[in-house]
Image (cartoon, grey):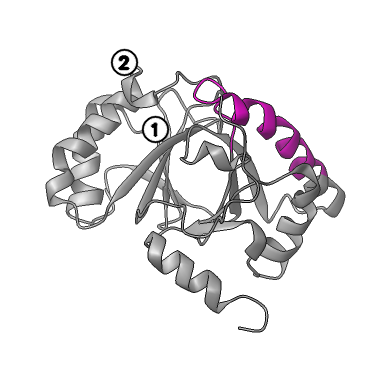
Amino acid sequence: MTDIDSTEMLAGTVKFYQRHIIICSGRTGWPAKIDLDGGYAQRLHEAVAKHAANMPLSVKITACDEPSRGDEPDLLVFPDEVRYVGVREIDLDDFVDDLLVQNVAPDWLRKENLDTHYIFVCAHGERDERCGLCAPVVLARLRAQIRAWDLSHLVTVRSSSHVGGHAHACNVLIYPPGDWYGHVTPDDAPRLLEKHILTNQTVLDLWRGRMGMTPEEQQVWAQAHQPGA
């Protein structure tokens, strides 16, 4: 295991992507590589890879511990801020073709608009030990602070599978707008909630980047928003 380097510059460490599909698996303890799990996640990855050449936007796929509404997994999609309910494995090709190639919301699926912020904390200990150690205490502090401040109507917190950059653990993603934070500790939880959720400010010293921005754009953005810049 590589130690966490808390001195490394964080801005610019998020790989470019424009859309995020999150599988509501209802559990943690995912296999090390969910794209090779032999089940639903692998099938979704295969469907996206099959159509990737025709997709106008680059796509990221992860899983979270959010329960689905029924027997089949729900899919959360950002920046659309939509939950597609009960997407059957046999329908994933059609789902990908409609939503990611044609850019048309599948009208044959039940969907719900997401009306809260979502915070995803990478807790994928099977992929990297650091996340398994760091995430539980950060998740606990976030949830405790949300209860203390009565913010459950504004924000949902979930454990996430591998997001990328585990050397920056604990990694936290917040939608909207898709900001990534790294080196997050339990003591940072109140600050993230107060600044990002309540006052719509970026916590610059923990900021890794944002969905839809290249690493170079992330670095420029961070430099431009430093105090006194």
Up-down relation of residue 43 to residue 209 (above or below): above
Q: Mark 1 points at which residue?
A: 86
Callout 1, which amino acid?
Gly
Q: Is residue 146 left or right of residue 177?
A: right
Up-down relation of residue 120 to residue 89 (above or below): below
The answer to whether any part of residue 213 appears in the image is no
Q: Is residue 46 left or right of residue 77?
A: left
Q: For the magenta stretch, what is the residue range?
A: 122-144
The answer to whether any part of residue 37 appears in the image is yes
**In this view of the protein, which residue sits in the foreground, 161 or 158?**
161
Up-down relation of residue 40 to residue 218 (above or below): above
Does residue 208 belong to the magenta stretch?
no
State the predominant SS element of the stretch in magenta: helix
Callout 2, which amino acid?
Gly
Q: Earlier in the sequence, mark 1 or mark 2?
A: 2
**In this view of the protein, which residue sits in the foreground, 42 or 82?**
42
